[in-house]
Amino acid sequence: MQNLMKNPIFRLVGIILILYFALLNNKKSPDSLGNRLSQENIIKNLSQGAKQTRETYKKAKEYQNKGYYFKIGQQIDHFKIHDSLIGLGKTAKLNDKIIINYSIYSTRTNKRLENNKNFELILGKNKFDSDLEKYIFGMKEGGMRSIVPTIDSQTRKNFSQLLKNNQDNLKFEIFLIKVN
C-alpha cells in the first residue's frame, strides 16, 4: 500500500476524485463547495456586493452633504481634521450643552501636553477656543475627532505656551461624551 501511495498516477487519481466529490457531487446542498462555486452563485454574490457598495457610498455622500463629519485628513481653514471614530448618538449643534474629553499632544513627540476630562461647554459661547469649537459642530455622541492647527493658525498661537520647540505643532483629540 505504501508503494502505491508513492506512485504519482495514484496521487493524481486521488486528487481528481477529491475534487469531483467536493465540486461536482452533491450540488443539491446549498453549502456544498460545488454549489457555492457555481457560475450563478458567483454572479449573485458579486451583484450583492456591488449593491452594498453603492448603498454605502450613497449613505456616506448623504452624511457628507449634511456636514455631519469631514473627509479623512481634510484641511479646512487652518486645520487638518480627521474623524478617528464616528459616534452614533445625538449630533452637536449651536447652543447645545456638551461634555467632552480632550487631550492636546505634541505632533513631533506625540507626548500628551494637557488632558481634560468631562469638560462642559455650550457650543457657540466660545468658552473653549473659538477656532476649535466650530469643528465640534456636527460631531455625534461617542465620536472622536483629531484637529491639527497649521503653523499660521491663531489656535496654535493661543496654546503656544505648551510648546517647548517652535518647530513643533499641536494635535487636539476631542471625544464627545454627551449632548444635551
Image: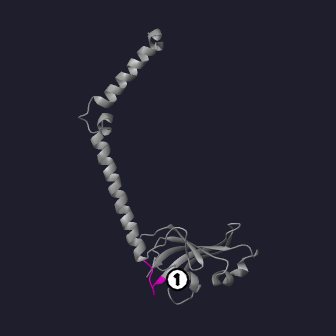
| 56 versus 100 height, above or below | above
Q: In this orientation, which residue lies closer to the viewer: 29 or 16?
A: 16
State whether residue 108 appears in this view. Answer: yes
Answer above or below: position of 28 versus 99. above
- Left or right of 43 on screen, residue 142: right
- Image coordinates of residue 17 in percent, x first then y, are 35, 22
Magenta span has 151?
no
Q: Main secondary structure of the magenta part?
A: loop
Q: What residue do we see at 25% from left, 36% from top?
A: 29
Instruction: Label 1, secondary structure: give it.
Output: loop
Q: Which residue is mark 1?
A: 134
Rendered residue at 67%/84% (across/down):
158
Q: Is residue 84 above or below residue 18?
A: below
For this orientation, the residue located farthest to the bottom is: 125
Q: Is the image coloured rainbow, by chain, by secondary structure, or in one colour?
A: one colour
Give the crowd class for mark 1: few <14, some 14-19, many >=20 residues within 10 Å.
some
Left or right: residue 59 compared with residue 148: left
Quadrant position of residue 62: bottom left
Q: Is residue 166 depicted above or below 31 in this figure?
A: below
In the image shown, does 115 or 7 lie closer to the viewer?
7
Magenta stretch bounds: 91-97
User: Residue 71: x and y, percent?
Assistant: 49, 69
In front of the other: 163 or 88: 163
Q: Given the current orientation, which residue lies at the most extreme right position?
A: 165
Q: In the displayed structure, does residue 131 sit left or right of residue 140?
A: right
